Structures are given as structure tokens and as C-alpha cells.
């Protein structure tokens, strides 16, 4: 095992963090375990370009044996982790990572596709002076609706075992498998608390990571009230995520220096909300574009690929699989991500081929695209509520508004923001008859559990620009999605393809005219708030 030397001292903070936590997760890099991320996404004030290659070889995270789960089915057999069983779709290797094909139904991953070259390091002669984050809750157990779907399959498995059935081929692992929901009433919809991808661990790790990245914003600023405000939607998993994050970002005694504000997820909030999908009454009752539109479109598509999987499983295991419908097979794919967030991996991942996982990913993309994304006429106007409030704060700058605005919500709320930003624009709406392999809309890298969208305000010296302006400071905005910098369409002339602030503000205003009034589109009552008022320090 590589040991610390004097050459590692400059990055001691990140290394200590890594020894305690599984901080980052993305495809394999050098000799690191494939489920971990490189150190380049943990820049420090003294090492903005990332740490040396030496760190990439340090086994800072314990091996999988130390994550041994006495309640799992694979006590000594670790082959399930590398996907060597079944159809091979569960493998994590140099050319495939199952975590990048779960459609937001699995652990956090770093965005690597469609990002700006150079990583998340701040452009030369620029500093981040204001941060606005909208984050999904961390890794969780299934929701109540998902748990009901999964239970149908689990009941069939348990019934087969009671009848002394033996499972074969791709489903052979079921002979020893047990369900990861040991106490459903206390687990359903809550953060996971076991394994390397535990939601509690992920939220805390994110707090430490962002503390490392934005520590200067805390140390150089005194909140007017004496405490830094941050916000969470009124959902237990969202609130718990915010609290675990706060422990990592502010410290264990975060209540002394920060104030968490819980924003109700109720219809009466109107536009003064983090969750506009709960208060847009027209959206909730629209026969064509309600939140159910996504599930409808997904159901149409999944019928194009699930029947062939049914046939294969029936041929391998006719006794058990004979009566499995499409929904049960889709639940098998869902179990891959859900079990991974609890146990660190899942044999369900290996039941399917890579093409079948690509189809599952597309099915999940359709859910969000048509539920509250670009494929729903309400998506962009609901996302514009937070975007408009944030644009105002960016215009005021840190001297007036303050430097930190951290909010925690659900994946659907992030999808609305992406629709408002219009960053992943496809020329045509996504088809449901076949997979659009060239699409820009891919949720796996955008809204995984723990996913986050950050707008950073950059203050740059003039000689950081091509058209030097007599030493004046220029201000820009850049979009950071899961530690991948994404250029805003039509607004990338600044350092590192950032967007000049004035141009960004004009873009948001223009976008507001395009998407329409939230109050009018959502049929709010005359006395209902039409905008966010609580985002202030």
C-alpha cells in the first residue's frame, strides 16, 4: 500500500477526507477501484489543476471486503461486483460503467459527457465569488410507489422458494438472494445508511467536497443574521440530506453557524416554493401534460424491448419466469440501482445486456423528459421560478446578496430547471417507438441520487480575457452539473466557456417571455405568490 510522503502534504485535506469517505464515483481511472472518481474533481486553493497522478494510485478507499454485508447473499463471492455473471451488463470497466446507465435510479456519478475541457478548476485569473446550488436528495430506498411495484416481483421470488424452486442461468443468484428492504415502514423513501453509496455518507461527503471547493466564501463573509441560510423542501429525505450535507460543509455544530429553512411542498405556496410541481394546479390536472405524462410515454417505449428479455428468461427458467409480465422485468432492472445504493452492488445488474441497459436508461429519460422536462409544456415555466430568483441574486452579487445559496429538492425540480435553462436541446421531441441514440437529454449523469446543479458567479481579471479591458474585473456565470462544466447554448464567450453576466441576465429574461407567466400558466389564484421571496441571506 502506498504511503504518505512529503510530496503529498499539499493535498492533505483531500487525502484525509478520502481515507474516511468514499467521496467521488465515476468510471475506472488507473489502479483505483472502478467505482471511485479521480482526484481532479477535488481541487484545492493550492492545487487548482488537480493532484498528481500519485494520488490516483493511493487506495484511499477500503476494498470491497471491508464493506462486507452480513445480510447480503454474497458473503465471500465478490464476482457480482465486476459483472462477471449473467449477460455482462453489470460490469464496471474501462469501456462500460453500469452506474452511468441507471437513468437517475442509482448512486451519484460525475458528469463526463458534453462537458467543457479543463475540468472544474476555476479559469486562470478568475475566482468564484457566489454559488447557487439546487441539489437532489442523496441516495435513498425506493419510494412508496416503486416499492409496491418491486414487492410484486419479490413476492413471486419468495413464493417460488417456498415451493422449493431452483433458479437457473441469469437468475441463479436468486437461490441465495434476499431482499434489501428489511424494515419497509422505516426504510421506504428514506436515505440509505449502509454500503459505500449510502445516502447519509454521500450527502456528508458532498458537504466536505464543497467546503473544500468554496471555503473562501465562508471565511471571507459574515452573514447579516450571524447564520448562513440554506433551504430544503419539506420531505424527510430532502431534509435529512440537507442536514448531513451541513455537517460536512459547516461542521458538526452547524446549527451554531447556519440556519436550515424548510419550505413546504404544498399547493398554497404558489410560486414561493422550491417544488413548483406541487403548486402548479393546472399542471396537476392537465389531461395531456400532467406529471403522469412521463410514465405514459415510458410505458409505450418499454414495450419495444422488454418482450425479448421475457422470452430469454422464460427459456432459461420456465417454471419461475413463465408468468412474469413486462412490469416485473422492468422491476428487475430497477432493483439493480436500488440495491446498489444499499449494498454497493447488485447481481440484478448482470442479468441484462448492455443494450438492454441502454434501453432502460432511455425509458428513464422519457419519464423525466415528458413529466417535467422539455417534453412537457409546463416544465420550463416551473423551472424558471428558481432561475429567475437566482438571476436576481447573481445580478446583485455577493456584496449585496451574499455568496452562498444552497437548496435541496427532488429530481423533478432539477429537471424543470434544466428545461428552463434549455441546455440539453434536442431538435425533435424524443420518440417512444425507438431509442434516440443521438439525444442530448440523458438523465443518468444529470439527476442521479445526490445530483446537483450549481451556477457559479466568476469574477475575472481583464487579462484573463482576450479583449483586455484596462484591469477592470469582469463577471461571468458558469454551469456546473455534477462536477462537469456545461456551456450554456449561445452564451460561452467567457473564460472556460462561461457566460458574461449581462448576457446571462438577458437570456433569462428572454427565456421568461418564451415560457410564459408562472401565475397564468398554472392558474394561480390572485392572492397566491408568483415568485420566490425566501432566497436571501
Image: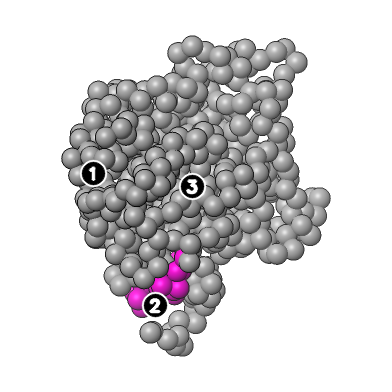
Residue 80 rendering spot, x and y as whole percentages? 31, 60
Q: Kindly identify which numbered label has been placed on residue 449.
A: 3
Mark 1 or 2: in front is: 1
10 Å neighbourhood of mark 1: few (<14), some, or many (≥20)?
some
The quadrant of the picture occupied by the C terminus is top right
Residue drawn at (79%, 59%) of the image = 256
Mark 2 or 3: in front is: 3
Q: Secondary structure at mark 1?
A: loop
Please state which of residues 84 and 397 is positioned toward the viewer in this rendering. 84
Q: Kindly identify which numbered label has been placed on residue 403.
A: none
* Residue of label 2: 58
Q: Quadrant of residue 397?
A: top right
Task: Tell me which numbered mark, 3 or 1, is placed earlier along the sequence.
Answer: 1
Q: Are marks 1 and 2 in contact (CB under 8 Å)?
A: no
Task: Tell me which numbered mark, 2 or 3, is placed earlier along the sequence.
Answer: 2
Relative to 145, does residue 515 appear above or below in the rendering? above
What is the distance, in whole Å, between disc 1 and disc 2 at their CAs?
Answer: 44 Å
10 Å neighbourhood of mark 3: few (<14), some, or many (≥20)?
many
Relative to 502, does residue 106 appear above or below in the rendering? below
Q: Quadrant of residue 263?
A: top right
Residue drawn at (63%, 34%) of the image = 274
* Residue of label 1: 317
The quadrant of the picture occupied by the N terminus is bottom left
Does the magenta portion include 67?
Answer: yes
Amino acid at each position: 500500500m502506498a504511503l504518505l510522503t512529503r510530496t503529498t502534504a499539499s493535498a492533505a485535506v483531500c487525502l484525509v477526507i478520502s481515507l474516511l469517505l468514499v467521496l467521488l464515483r465515476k468510471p475506472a481511472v488507473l489502479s483505483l477501484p472502478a467505482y471511485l472518481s479521480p482526484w481532479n474533481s477535488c481541487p484545492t486553493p493550492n492545487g487548482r489543476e488537480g493532484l498528481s497522478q500519485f494520488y490516483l494510485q493511493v487506495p484511499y478507499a477500503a476494498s470491497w471486503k471491508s464493506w462486507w454485508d452480513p445480510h447480503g447473499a454474497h458473503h465471500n463471492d465478490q464476482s457480482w461486483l465486476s459483472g462477471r455473471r449473467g449477460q455482462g451488463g453489470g460490469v464496471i470497466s474501462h469501456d462500460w460503467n453500469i452506474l452511468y446507465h441507471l437513468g437517475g435510479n442509482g448512486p451519484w456519478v460525475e458528469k463526463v459527457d458534453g462537458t467543457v475541457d479543463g475540468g472544474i478548476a476555476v479559469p486562470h485569473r478568475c475566482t468564484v465569488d457566489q454559488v447557487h446550488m439546487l441539489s437532489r436528495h442523496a441516495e435513498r430506498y425506493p419510494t412508496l410507489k416503486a416499492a409496491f411495484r418491486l414487492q410484486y416481483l419479490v413476492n413471486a421470488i419468495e413464493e417460488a422458494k417456498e415451493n422449493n424452486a431452483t433458479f437457473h442461468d441469469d437468475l441463479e443468484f436468486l437461490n441465495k438472494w434476499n431482499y434489501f428492504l428489511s424494515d419497509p415502514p422505516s426504510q421506504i423513501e428514506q436515505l440509505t445508511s449502509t454500503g459505500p453509496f449510502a445516502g447519509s455518507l454521500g450527502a456528508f461527503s458532498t458537504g466536505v467536497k464543497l467546503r473544500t471547493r468554496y471555503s473562501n466564501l465562508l471565511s471571507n463573509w459574515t452573514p447579516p443574521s450571524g447564520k448562513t441560510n440554506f433551504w430544503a423542501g419539506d420531505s424527510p429525505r430532502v431534509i435529512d440530506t440537507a442536514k448531513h450535507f451541513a455537517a460536512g460543509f459547516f461542521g458538526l455544530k452547524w446549527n451554531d453557524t447556519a440556519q436550515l429553512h424548510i419550505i413546504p411542498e404544498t399547493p398554497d405556496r404558489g410560486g414561493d416554493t422550491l417544488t413548483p410541481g406541487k403548486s402548479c394546479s393546472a399542471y396537476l390536472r392537465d389531461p395531456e401534460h400532467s406529471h403522469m405524462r412521463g410514465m405514459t410515454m415510458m410505458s409505450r417505449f418499454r414495450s419495444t424491448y422488454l418482450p425479448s428479455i421475457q422470452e430469454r428468461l422464460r427459456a432459461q427458467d420456465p417454471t419461475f419466469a413463465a408468468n412474469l409480465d413486462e412490469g416485473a422485468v422492468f422491476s428487475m432492472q430497477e432493483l439493480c440501482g436500488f440495491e446498489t445504493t444499499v449494498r454497493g452492488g447488485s447481481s440484478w445488474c448482470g442479468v441484462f445486456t448492455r443494450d438492454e441497459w441502454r434501453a432502460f436508461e432511455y425509458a428513464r429519460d422519457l419519464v423525466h423528459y415528458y413529466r417535467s422536462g422539455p417534453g412537457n409544456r409546463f416544465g420550463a415555466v416551473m423551472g424558471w421560478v428558481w432561475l429567475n430568483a437566482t438571476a436576481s441574486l447573481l445580478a446583485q452579487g455577493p456584496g449585496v446578496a451574499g455568496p452562498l445559496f444552497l437548496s435541496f429538492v427532488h429530481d423533478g425540480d432539477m429537471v424543470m430547471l434544466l428545461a428552463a435553462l434549455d441546455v440539453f436541446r434536442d431538435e425533435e421531441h424524443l420518440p417512444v417507438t425507438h431509442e434516440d441514440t443521438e439525444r442530448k437529454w440523458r438523465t443518468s449523469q444529470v439527476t442521479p441520487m445526490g445530483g446537483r446543479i450549481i451556477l457559479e458567479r466568476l469574477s475575472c481579471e481583464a487579462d484573463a480575457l482576450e479583449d483586455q479591458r484596462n484591469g477592470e474585473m469582469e463577471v461571468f456565470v458558469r454551469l456546473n452539473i455534477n462536477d462537469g462544466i456545461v456551456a450554456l447554448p449561445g452564451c460561452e464567450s467567457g473564460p472556460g466557456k462561461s457566460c458574461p453576466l449581462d448576457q446571462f441576465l438577458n437570456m433569462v429574461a428572454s427565456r421568461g417571455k418564451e415560457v410564459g407567466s408562472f401565475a397564468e400558466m398554472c392558474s394561480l389564484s390572485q392572492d397566491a405568490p408568483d415568485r420566490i421571496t425566501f432566497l436571501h441571506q
